Image (cartoon, coloured by chain):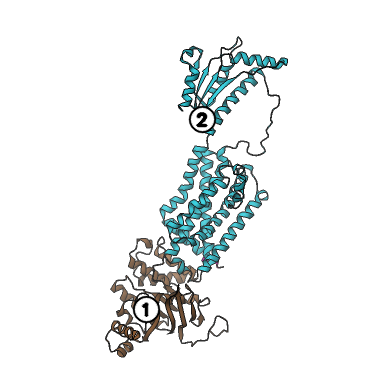
Amino acid sequence: MNLDRVLAIAKKNLRSLRRDRRTFAFIFMVPFMMMLIFGYTFGGEVENINVYVVNLDEGSPVGSLSWRIIDELNSTETLNIVHIYTSADASLDPVNLSIQKVRNAEVWGAIVFEKNFTKDALWSIASLASGHPFVSSNMTLHLDGTNPNVAKAVSGSLSGALQKILTTRFHLNAPVSIETDMVYGEDTKFIDFFAPGIMGLAGFLVTFMLTIVTFVRERSSSTLERLLTTPVKESEVVAGYAISFGLMALAQSTVILVTGVLLFNVQVEGSFLLALLVFFLLGVGSMGMGLMFSSIAKNELQAVQFVPMVFIPSILLAGIFWPLEAIPEFLRPISSFIPLTYAVDGARSIMIRGWGVDQIWVQIVILALFAIAMLFLSTLMLKRRK
Amino acid sequence: MQESGKRRVKRSEDYAITTENLRKEFDGLVAVDDLNLRVKKGILYGMIGPNGSGKTTTIKVLMGIQRPTRGTGSILGECIPVKDNIQKIGYMPQEMAVYYDLSIHENLELFAALYSVKKEEFQQREKVLLEMVDLVERKDDAVSKLSGGMRHRVSLACTLVHEPEVLFLDEPTVGVDPELRAGFWEYFGKLKDLGKTIIMTTHYMDEAVRCDVVGMMRAGRLIAEGAPDELLARTSTDNLEDAFLFYSREGKT
């Protein structure tokens, strides 16, 4: 293999991209926008969920438990209490009125405290202390469960508020508590979890598409034919492509990571360079894959049709947004055949767990093998063409 | 040529290109029909014939782009597909086959690098070639910004950048204006004087007259071959077009 010729091919690809401004913008803007959109939509917690509160609680001489809970709910950002009905509004039939609001999808939930809420609760607490049987006090949550995330946030914030009041005001602790020791990911936000996924996805997809389109063009304009009449070997063409598009994958990962760190404070516990190595290997592999697919396509349009075919399984089965454990058992073997799975898993371990080569060598080896296999197969494919 | 390798065939050293019963079929359709070609070194050989007569296919098979169905060929004594002599061969395809997103200079630099042309040598040659194709001023323009004729000239310059000994030019003068075509022919003459062999296909009969030897092709076969004067004398015609028609009719009867 002649290094000068390999570099000449790589240089040619990079120079072509530099002049093709639109493609150049596509390479860097797509991952940037992906990160921006995903970052802003998935990055934050669910907030300002509109709810109604109906507080019919008459309280007790020592105070009102329901109002304390409502105060606690008001102090967080999760719920936005649109209106509070009290017993003074009894003539309006506030319970049915607020349930109707939920039914009309004007609010996500209605929290109802019954007349004897505080009394019952205090009675229960006293009974608990004296060992008498008791029926626990109730508040009712009428909830629109259309969006599981919202539903989870409403019930979560309600039980959180209740728990807090019981602990601070009544020193009531649960008899058994779970002590969680976060081995990794102490302050991990959802965006930290999916940032490596987006990096991998963008690197994989754009490299794959770029190769497919460039190579189909190279074939249709007969430049490939011409290249292969020069002393350049098939393996050198493939290596040149691997270097240039591998570098593209690196540049993209960097754009995504810098965006993530600057705008969304994405955490990077381990070595950034090691994460880049993971994406470089993935980029080289997807380049080879693109090259192979390009041999099946007759024109650029046909080539682009492969993108969703590769995109959908990758986005769904590589553990980018959902953990692999959430995928039905029979689909899981497919995940192990998607190289993106290993790249995302490896990068996540580096960025969140702070792992090094000694812990993620398996992923690196798998990605390297994938890259080598793809390079080898695409070289063979080029040779066969001749 | 002197080595006794599997890839070597003993040929007269006078020939730059030979083919031996070379045949190429596409799905049963015969494009090149048992062609026996002998192109002497240092001459300008013109292949003429209508579309589909097998000119381009012959060149593609010789260049190793397509595999012959049967038969063989050699370039500078080496059996096709050529490996050892690849450095000495230049090929200009009929399609533009240059990179539109690269500048003229970048295209030339790429092909020079692929042929391992040294930097200083490249700088000198680039100057000469750009003058020849009259594109000195446009050197740094992207090929996509050039006209069709200009792109053709860039393609020719890319073929010549490594100073090959044997040149395969497939329709090199298509879309080139008459003035520049004259310039091209002058340059071809110079290359010939330097001992280079040129085999070219053309549609222009007035160009074919300038070749040392003309091979007339029809339906994948060589129907006549000789110096233009000779062909005219043999057919008692005064232009190659009529001579071609003469041989064409003769072949049919």
The residue drawn where x is 33% and y is 64% is B147
- Chain coloured cyan in the rendered structure: A
The residue that mark 1 highlights is B188
- Chain coloured brown in the rendered structure: B
Check chain identity for marks 1 and 2: say if they share one: no
Label placed on residue A367: none
Chain ID at mark 1: B
SS for callout 2: loop
Q: In this view, does B13 lie to the left or right of A182?
A: left
Quadrant where the N terminus of chain A is found in the figure? bottom right
Q: Which amino acid does label 2 sit on?
A: Glu
The answer to which of A65 and B199 lies nearer the viewer is: A65
Q: Which amino acid does label 1 sit on?
A: Phe
Query: What is the x, y in percent for residue A123?
Result: 65, 14
Q: In this view, does B130 lie above or below B7?
A: above
The answer to which of A125 and A331 lies nearer the viewer is: A331
Camera sees residue A266: no
Q: In this view, does B62 lie to the left or right of B141?
A: right
**Closer to us: mark 1 or mark 2?**
2
Q: Is residue A212 left or right of residue B193?
A: right
The residue that mark 2 highlights is A47
| Magenta span contains residue A154 | no
Q: In this view, does A82 lie above or below B18?
A: above
Query: What is the x, y in percent for residue A324?
Result: 60, 44
Q: How far apart, in angstroms, are the residues tagged by discs 1 and 2?
A: 77 Å
The residue most toward the left is: B238
